[in-house]
Amino acid sequence: QVQLVESGGGLVQAGGSLRLSCAASGRTSSIFTMGWFRQAPGKEREFVARITWSSGGTYYVDSVKGRSTISRDNVKNTVYLQMNSLKPEDTAVYYCAVQDRSSRTYDYWGQGTQVTVSS
């Protein structure tokens, strides 16, 4: 089992920045990638970004590419999502998740952190 705790959400004006953090504990050796997802009111959860734990390789959804950076600290077992030039459409609950090395599915999820961008 992997436990995830997110932090860093909040209220920010359009054009502002936020950095989300997600600390992993437990069976961290099972982490293949860590990802960020978000769910806006009335919409389905969508993928935002992921980082491969061993190599640091990254991938982003087009809507955040160029505005967001995902990074990780392997010592602290923490993944970050730096979001810049925020837009009202970025408003959502943001979740971090772990893609398990064996199953290659996102098996572990955090509780979510609210990001609200005002216009």
Image (cartoon, rainbow, N blue to C red):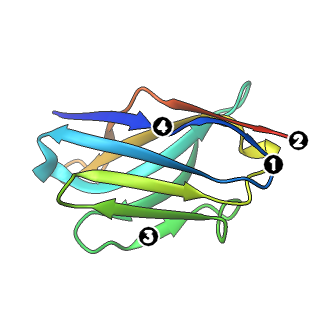
Residue 58 is marked as 3
Asked whether the beta carbons under mark 1 and mark 2 sit within 8 Å of each other, the answer is yes
Q: What residue type is labelled 2?
A: Ser
User: Would residue 28 be found to the left or right of residue 73 on screen?
Assistant: left
Mark 1 or 4, closer to the camera: 1
Residue 108 is marked as none
Q: What residue type is labelled 4?
A: Tyr
Q: What residue type is labelled 1?
A: Ala
Label 1 sits on residue: 14
Asked whether the beta carbons under mark 2 and mark 3 sit within 8 Å of each other, the answer is no
Residue 95 is marked as 4
Give whichever of discs 4 and 3 has the lower sequence position.
Answer: 3
Mark 2 or 3, closer to the camera: 2
Mark 1 or 3, closer to the camera: 1
Mark 2 or 4, closer to the camera: 2
Inter-mark Cα distance, 1 to 3: 25 Å
Asked whether the beta carbons under mark 4 and mark 3 sit within 8 Å of each other, the answer is no
